[in-house]
Amino acid sequence: MAILDRTDQGASEATIAEHPIQPCMQANVLWMLSDFTEANGATRVTPRSHWSGKQPDPAASDNIETVAAVAPAGSALVLDGRTWHGAGINQTNHSRAALATSYCVPQLRPMENYSLGSLPAVLADASPALLTRL
């Protein structure tokens, strides 16, 4: 499991919103196939950003406080889909491998549209169960 310091208040722009925010509608899971370290650019996360009710300011992105999701291979990082996150800088000569998955509520359009993005020949040979899943 990735360890994040939840007690650090930091200098982030991600403060708790003073107005109602949308509920979580997506969860992201990053399956770490390699060790995630500071040196190899472990995913950076802004704690509590999912409570801010806003997107990060691109102009201030260099000033947003983040923590590295450092963990051994075989770990998973699970995030509320509203959490600000991004890849760190890999300062090693080795790759960092991960599998990113996303789960969203049915009324939202997923990031991938497999029924439109699949080859017609694949769809023609697909079982009814697979077509339902797509």
Image (cartoon, rainbow, N blue to C red):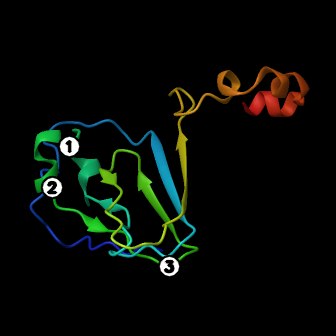
The residue carrying mark 2 is 64
How many angstroms separate mark 1 from mark 2 (CA)? 8 Å
Residue 72's label in the rendered image is: 3
How many angstroms separate mark 3 from mark 2 (CA)? 25 Å
Q: Is residue 55 visible?
A: yes
Residue type at tag 1: Pro
User: What residue lies at 34% left-to-right and 53% top-to-bottom?
Assistant: 86
User: What residue lies at 36% left-to-right and 57% top-to-bottom?
Assistant: 87
Residue type at tag 3: Pro
The residue carrying mark 1 is 56
For the residue carrying disc 2, how many other residues have a C-alpha within 10 Å: few (<14), some (14-19), or many (20+)?
some
Q: Is residue 79 left or right of residue 34?
A: left
Q: Of helix, strand and loop, which one carries label 1?
A: loop
13 shown above or below 19: below
Q: Is residue 74 left or right of residue 27?
A: right
Q: Of helix, strand and loop, which one carries label 2?
A: loop
Q: Residue 50: horizontal and vertical position, in percent?
A: 29, 49
Q: Quadrant of residue 71?
A: bottom left
Q: Earlier in the sequence, mark 1 or mark 3?
A: 1
For the residue carrying disc 1, how many other residues have a C-alpha within 10 Å: few (<14), some (14-19), or many (20+)?
some
User: What residue lies at 37% left-to-right and 69% top-to-bottom?
Assistant: 69
Say which of 105 and 34 sits in front. 34
Q: Quadrant of residue 113?
A: top right
Q: Are marks 3 and 2 in contact (CB under 8 Å)?
A: no
Q: Quadrant of the C terminus?
A: top right
Q: Earlier in the sequence, mark 1 or mark 2?
A: 1
Q: Earlier in the sequence, mark 3 or mark 2?
A: 2
Q: Residue 119: horizontal and vertical position, in percent?
A: 75, 25
Residue type at tag 2: Ile
Q: Are marks 1 and 2 in contact (CB under 8 Å)?
A: yes
